[in-house]
Amino acid sequence: MLRKTSPHREQAGHTQMQQQQLIERLRQQDSQALGQLYDAYANALFGVMIRIVQSKELAEQVLQDTFLKAWRNAAAYDSTKGKLFTWLLNIARNTAIDATRTAHFKNSAVTENIETLLSQPGTQGINPETLGLKELIGRLDEKYRQLIDFIYFKGYTQEEIAEETGIPLGTIKTRLRYAINELRNLFEEHQTA
Amino acid sequence: MDIQSFLESGILESYVLDQCTPEERQQVEQMARDHAIVRTELEAIESAMSNYAQAHSLQAPEGLREKILQAATQPQAPTHAGPASDAVDQPASSSANRIINILFAVIALAMAAYVLRAQQQSKDFEAQITDLKTQLQACNDRSDKNRQIAAFIRDRDTRSILLTDGQNLKITVFSNELRQETYLDMSGIFTPSKGLYFQFWAIVDGAPVSLGMVDLQAPGGLQPFKYVANAQAYAISQENTPEGSKLPTIVVAQGKTS
């Protein structure tokens, strides 16, 4: 079934042209561009990292590594293959997930209870729109949200989830597609409301 | 594969979540180039996942921005400065010329010496910083190790098994089935006589299984051993060789797991 197409939100903080200019300046090693990149995306990336590594100190380190990787590999970004934020998100997620797979992390006692971490001062959501988005996600059916979380925050592949749960891979793929479709519906309703 | 099946296969979601194989990635990119609807679907999925990430936004730590900018823009070592090249009115006499040229040469040499010294100092500082970082890392590693051990002991699934000789000797084994880890506490173990060594055993189905030789110098005072399922008991034996034996020679302490 084809979904009706509708205009989607621009990436946080930048229009497409601004993104293109930003990436050009990054490639020219303009440090102000790095600062602007940080200002636009650091909070979103930090929130994702906290969810993955569950440690403020480690999330800070991973965030630093992410921006330095983006700085050093700006030439590798290809706008025809996806948005700048998606590129950054994938660097961030992969760096964070890799950090959780080290033997050091597995036996580490520094992981904090995620709810405790999120309830500390200075770790709140940062603006009403973020809270609105969070509320929308809360409306997603629990099993779909868990599936997305396992893939997005824990780095499981769909094959690994199928193997762990005994659910056929085809079913996992269908559920993920359905889950993301539901997210799309929720976000689009929010935008048009 | 027709477009509809391609869109419903889940490959686009995998692409956005960066879980595609290189071949799948190429396939998606080719399809996106060839079909606008694939591009539109990709963008919509990207948008949904971006919003998902945004929904989890948290204030990044203070000071991190400056730290990142500093790390990204490490100052370069000063380059060798050449002699001053200001235009100077040439004096009429050749001896004056020579004096001026000598002066420039002396200044140039002095500047070169200064720059070289500064570079050497910079290298020394870098070496010191590297050394400090290495030491700090070693401290952090030891600290992490101690935290790991503390967390293991505090874990509610960790069981402690007391090994005794029936008299004064008491040695604790910590074992956790879920973590698949076993630790031997060194604090209860005495140093054996010269030429003698301790070997650690698990008793499984009535038979001893060697877990390895005891290292009295284990960091943190706890030595990790491989976890053995269904251990009915643990024991420590005294052996005559550093490699140990296939069977316990003299059992010095033992304890049941249940």
Image (tube, coloured by chain):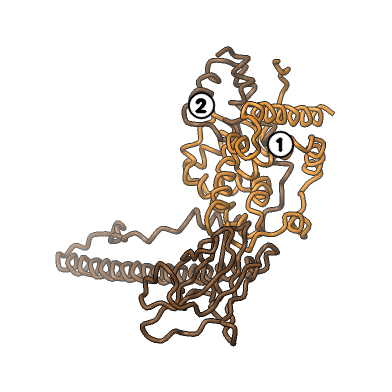
Chain colours: A orange, B brown
Residue A67 visible, this angle: no
Q: How far apart are marks 1 and 2 (CA)?
A: 25 Å
Which residue occupies the foreground of this view, A21 or B134?
Answer: B134
Q: Can you name the residue that lies furthest to the left here?
A: B94
- Res B238 quadrant in image: bottom left
Q: Residue at x 47, y 30 (%)?
A: B22
B41 over B205 or under it: above or below: above
Mark 2 surroundings within 10 Å by alpha-carbon count, few (fewer than 14), some (14 through 19), many (20 or more): some
* Residue B221 image point, x, y percent: 53, 76
Q: Which of the two marks, 1 or 2, is nearer to us in this view?
A: 2
Nearest to the observer: residue B145 or residue B241: B241
Dot 2 amino acid type? Glu
Task: Looking at this view, name the residue that lies furthest to the top.
Answer: B2
Q: Position of residue A27 (x, y in %)?
A: 48, 40
Residue depicted at 50% across the width and 20% down the height: B30
Query: Which three-letter amino acid code belongs to the residue tagged 1?
Result: Asn
Residue A135 image point, x, y percent:
82, 40
The residue wearing badge 1 is B51
* Horizontal side, residue B43 vs residue B109: left or right: right
Subunit bearing disc 1: B
1 or 2: tag closer to the N-terminus: 2
Describe residue B132's horizontal placement relative to residue B156 as left or right: left
Describe the element under mark 2 as helix, strand or loop: helix
Q: Where is residue B105 in the image (x, y as percent from the top left)?
A: 23, 67
Left or right, residue B194 beside residue A28: left
Q: Which of the numbered marks, if any, corresponds to residue B24?
A: 2
Side of A6 relative to B108 (left or right): right
Towards the viewer: A65 or B102: A65
**Same subunit, tags 1 and 2:** yes
Numbered-mark total: 2
Mark 1 element type: helix
